[in-house]
Amino acid sequence: MAILIRVSDEIEIITLLTHVGSQIHLTSAVIFTLPSSSMCQLRMAAKSLGNIWKKQKFES
C-alpha cells in the first residue's frame, strides 16, 4: 500500500507499506517538487555544506 502526503506545493512524502510474512516494512521518501532553478540552488547549498563538513572533519 502506498500513501502520498502533500505537505505543501513544494514537498510531498510518499510512504510504502509492504507486508513480508508476519512483519510490516515501512519505507518513506520525501519528494521536493521545486522549480529546476530552486533545485539547482538546493544542490549547490548541500554540496557546499558537505565540503565544509569534510574540511572540519579532517582538521579536527
Image: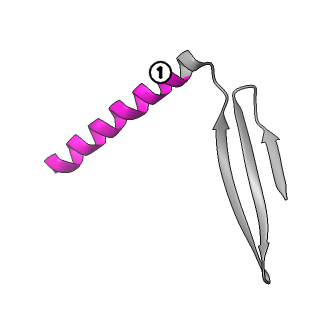
Q: Is residue 40 within the magenta segment? A: yes
CA neighbours of label 1 inside 10 A, class few (<14), some (14 to 19), many (20+): few
Is the N terminus in the top left, top right, bottom left or bottom right quadrant? bottom right
At x 36% / y 35%, what residue is drawn? 49
Q: Secondary structure at mark 1?
A: helix
- Closest to the observer, 40 or 49: 40
Q: Is residue 9 within the magenta segment? A: no
Q: Position of residue 54 (x, y in %)?
A: 25, 44
Q: Position of residue 12 (x, y in %)?
A: 73, 37
Q: Position of residue 42 (x, y in %)?
A: 49, 27
In this view, the residue farthest toward the bottom is 22
- In the rendered image of this protein, does residue 26 appear above or below residue 12? below
At x 63% / y 24%, what residue is drawn? 34
What's the amino acid at mark 1? Gln
The residue singled out by tag 1 in the image is 41
At x 78% / y 83%, what residue is drawn? 21
- Closest to the observer, 59 or 35: 35
> How many dots with numbers?
1
Name the quadrant containing residue 46. Answer: top left
| 46 left or right of 55 in image | right
| Start-end of magenta stretch | 39-60
Name the quadrant containing residue 48. Answer: top left
| 47 left or right of 27 in image | left
- Closest to the observer, 36 or 13: 36
